[in-house]
Amino acid sequence: MWYVIQTLSGEEEKTANVIRNMISPDLVRECFVPKRERMKKFHGSWNKVEEVLFQGYAFVVSERPGELYEELRRVPKLTRVLGREDNFFFSLGEKEEKLIRGLGDRNHKTSLSKIAVGEGRKLQVIDGPLKGYAGHMVKMNLHKREVTVRVEFMGRVLELKMGIETVDVGKTS
């Protein structure tokens, strides 16, 4: 099952590395921080960069949540395990797990989506992780080459910024 660890924003990867190093592999099948690709302009040219997709969160996959929780209490900079009540904490629901799996590849990285911009700045998703989320796009910034997608995650509405590249509809192959 998947669990969400809340940490300081900007400390996600550091926290995940500490968990990987301090917690027994018997308790942690995987610890990861979902990333997104986006294009950023440096010195006049566009470059592909990686950024954290869910700021302030790391994810842990474990089948032994009670023992995992006890071990996580030793991890520095750990804010809290989300869903913690009394002597247990909750796993991510199937919907949230499916969201994270659907947005990223097997390394939990969300690649750029290819989009075409039609009349009236209407977006058409040609390929990529945004394919299933076209109706959830709430903002677009073509200058920054990103769109904002509104999703429900753990009972809250989050806005995730996703990287895009524009293509001409006639040149999608």
Image (spheres, rainbow, N blue to C red):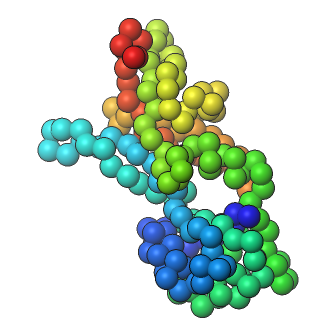
Q: Quadrant of the rendered structure where residue 30 is?
A: bottom right
Please tell me which residue is depicted at 60% across the width and 84% down the height of the picture. 24
Position of the C terminus, as image quadrant, is top left
In this rendering, is residue 100 above or below 65? above
**Farthest-out residue, left:** 43
Residue 64: percent from left, percent from top:
75, 77
**Farthest-out residue, right:** 86
**Depth check: 120 or 114 in front?**
114
In this rendering, is residue 127 above or below 49? above
Residue 81: percent from left, percent from top:
68, 75
**Residue 84 appears in the rendering:** no
Count of numbered labels shown in the rendering: 0
Residue 52: percent from left, percent from top:
46, 57
53 sits to left or right of 64: left
Please tell me which residue is depicted at 70% across the width and 63% down the height of the picture. 2
**Depth check: 144 or 16 in front?**
16
Please tell me which residue is depicted at 49% across the width and 26% down the height of the picture. 127
**Residue 27 appears in the rendering:** yes
131 sits to left or right of 40: right
In this rendering, is residue 22 above or below 96? below
Please tell me which residue is depicted at 62% across the width and 32% down the height of the picture. 133
**Depth check: 30 or 54 in front?**
30
Residue 158: percent from left, percent from top:
63, 49
**Farthest-out residue, bottom:** 74
Position of the N terminus, as image quadrant, is bottom right
70 sits to left or right of 145: right
In this rendering, is residue 97 above or below 117? below
